[in-house]
Amino acid sequence: MIAPPGAGKGTQGAVLAEHLGVPHIASGDLLRDHVARRTEIGRSVQQFVERGELVPDDVVLEMVRSALLVADDGYVLDGVPRTMAQARALYDAALEMDATADVALHLQVGEAELVRRLLARAEEQGRADDTDEVIRHRLALYDEVTHPILDWYDERGILVSVDAEPSADDVSRHVITALEVVRQIIAGNPDAPRTAINLTGLGKAFGA
Ligand code: AP5
């Protein structure tokens, strides 16, 4: 899953993982867990996470690779890759494990709604990086560094883009419907060339 902060990666990742019966591996959750347990990794990444900076690629990749090794039947990967270097490294790691990404899921949400959601969460949960200034920085980093990776998945034909502004339940329905279609396409001919699927205009085309 590749999407900006607040787009619903955590929310939809959990739903999807349950639907597919696979683990939900979220880099942000793994990092926050290390910080909370004050592990060596946690101490080294705490400032990056709290300031909304990207944690160095090698730290993230090592952590995620360990989580992937025990997920034999697939997984929902949330928050990785965030840099082109991470995308390439994960591609190579997947090849070594004789695996490949079936879908790169992109959740599209406008900036005003992203900020609204994160500030609302700040009031409820007080996550250290949900301050106005850090939210703006996280969004800017996403636009600059992470968003361009979508082109790579688009060219490979595995990108599925969904409008994630509606309610979480509606977004879940759209995502699961789209992925079930992809599942059937892959089951029919796993080696056939794929075409990216862009559902972000559905709302405008058909109304709410
Ligand atoms: P991470 O935890 O991945 O944070 P993020 O990308 O900023 O995403 P969020 O968790 O804020 O949002 P989300 O998209 O998961 O949305 P959510 O479902 O929570 O990363 C944190 C930090 O770790 C990074 O800044 C970086 O420092 C580091 N890091 C992580 N991965 C890294 C990597 N690969 N490389 C380097 N550094 C890395 O929803 C947000 C809120 O909106 C919730 O309150 C939710 O209830 C609500 N909501 C969700 N969907 C809807 C909806 N449809 N309508 C209304 N409200 C909704």
Image: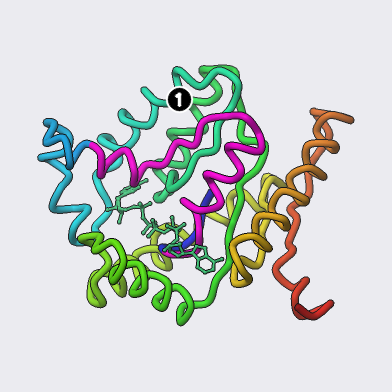
Task: State the image coordinates of residue 164 (x, y, percent, origin top left).
Answer: 60, 66
Q: Is residue 169 left or right of residue 57?
A: right
For badge 1, the amino acid type reads Leu
The image quadrant of residue 116 is: bottom left
Above or below residue 75? Residue 7 is below
Q: Nearer the viewer, residue 45 or 194?
A: 45
Q: Which residue is mark 1?
A: 68
The segment highlighted magenta reads 6-33
Q: Is label 1 within 8 A of ligand 1 (CB to nearest ligand atom)?
A: no
User: Is 143 inside the magenta-drawn segment?
Assistant: no
The image quadrant of residue 98 is: top right
The secondary structure that most of the magenta stretch takes on is helix
Above or below residue 161? Residue 189 is above
Q: Say which element carries label 1.
A: helix
Q: Nearer the viewer, residue 36 or 87?
A: 36
Residue at 24% from the left image edge and 63% from the top image edge: 126
Task: State the image coordinates of residue 195 (x, y, percent, origin top left).
Answer: 78, 49
Residue at 46% from the left image edge and 33% from the top image edge: 90
User: Is 28 inside the magenta-drawn segment?
Assistant: yes
Task: State the image coordinates of residue 173 (x, y, percent, origin top left).
Answer: 72, 55
Above or below residue 9? Residue 62 is above
